Image: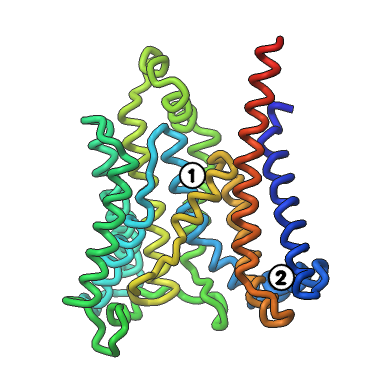
Amino acid sequence: MERYKGILIIIVSFFLAIVIGGLLMLLYKVSPIEGYKEMIWGALGNKFVFYSTLARMVPILLTGLSIAISFHAGIWNIGAQGQLYLAAFVVAAMGVTFHGIPSILYLTIGVSVGLLVGGAWAWIPGYLKVKYNVNEVVLTIMMNSIAVYFTLYMVNGPFRTTQGSLGATNVIDKAMWFKHLNPLSNLNTGVYLAIVAVGVIVYLMTFSKYGYEWKMSRLNSRFSVYGGVNVKKNMLIAMVISGMLAGLAGTILVMGDYHRFLNGISPGYSWTGMILAMMVNYDPIGVIITSFVYAVMASGGLRMELMLNIPQELVQIIFVLSVMFVTAGYAMSNRIANRIQEEG
């Protein structure tokens, strides 16, 4: 029971949130079965909407894994938003500045730059944490603001578009575009990079010695040091990889989705990813599943609103309720376990 406690809590919590969401649908005189049917059809009903759902899932999944891998090593990266923004902007700035580069080379350089910028922006708080024990939570939150406001200044100043008054850069060189897999959706060949990245992260966290050392560093850093594990090095490596994942999310948004940098390019992807990662206790497989479920709900909510006149904000209500129930479930289970231990 202890082994499957987390899975049970998540399943029960999601079920309760779905039930309450169904009750709210009744207030609109709509059958919950019909409402959820339209939601699922709107996200998975045909090739076009399925591709759109996957496109919505990619940045949430990458930022969720970004949070998961850093926590797995015992260091908190709350700076995925800033790493995403800064990487996305640098890639876009390069795409509007340089022209005449062969496409395969430009794509390679663009992805590499996005990874490096995201990783470098995460390295700063990681280094300060392991070297001087600076609180990485506070530092990464502050660096989020620095990155976001810096890019805001740049797209309304030196890199402001000449094609309108929108807070954005010009469109990047077409040689830098990821190809869309369907002309009616945003899903593009960047999804293949995301799949590779997810596979690497799952392997590192679950099957490699690095994942084991990261976990031991988090659970008992002093014991790990005695066992010959370089805890500080592991924390820093995990932090850099975490930033690279966030940077990859920003790179795909620029090179595949929007083909430019937009002010507000991430409508809270990193925060959603962080919450989803926390819900599944930072398990990489759990992050994949919850990211897909959330993307289905968010995409299907549009059709639900269109067909049944139910506000798509209902999806956010279900999401928040799920988080609340999961948090309460863990708290209750821990309290019960402590009481049993005391009585025993």
Residue 255 locus on image (x, y percent): 38, 71
| Position of the C terminus by quadrant | top right
- Foreground pick, 139 / 72: 139
| Position of the N terminus by quadrant | top right
**Label 1 SS:** helix
Please indicate whether residue 71 sits to the left or right of residue 83 in the image. Answer: right
- Foreground pick, 334 / 29: 29
Residue farthest along the front direction in this orientation: 27
Colour scheme of the rendered structure: rainbow
Image quadrant assignment for residue 207 = top right
Residue at 69% from the left image edge and 75% from the top image edge? 310
Please name which of the two marks, 1 or 2, marks the residue nearer to the observer. 2
Is the residue marked by circle 1 packed among few (<14), some (14-19), or many (20+) residues within 10 Å? many
Q: Amino acid at mark 2?
A: Met
Residue at 67% from the left image edge and 44% from the top image edge? 10
Is the residue marked by circle 2 packed among few (<14), some (14-19), or many (20+) residues within 10 Å? many
Residue farthest along the left direction in this orientation: 158
Q: Which residue is mark 1?
A: 201
Residue at 31% from the left image edge and 28% from the top image edge? 232
Image quadrant assignment for residue 309 = bottom right
Residue 58 locus on image (x, y percent): 51, 61
Q: CA distance from mark 1 to mark 2?
A: 31 Å
Residue at 73% from the left image edge and 68% from the top image edge? 40
Residue 118 locus on image (x, y percent): 32, 54
Q: Which residue is mark 2?
A: 39
Is 86 placed above or below 211 here? below
**Label 2 SS:** helix
Residue farthest along the bottom direction in this orientation: 163
Give the mark, 1 or 2, whose residue is nearer the N terminus. Answer: 2
Image quadrant assignment for residue 234 = top left
Q: Amino acid at mark 1?
A: Ile
Is 51 placed above or below 21 here? below
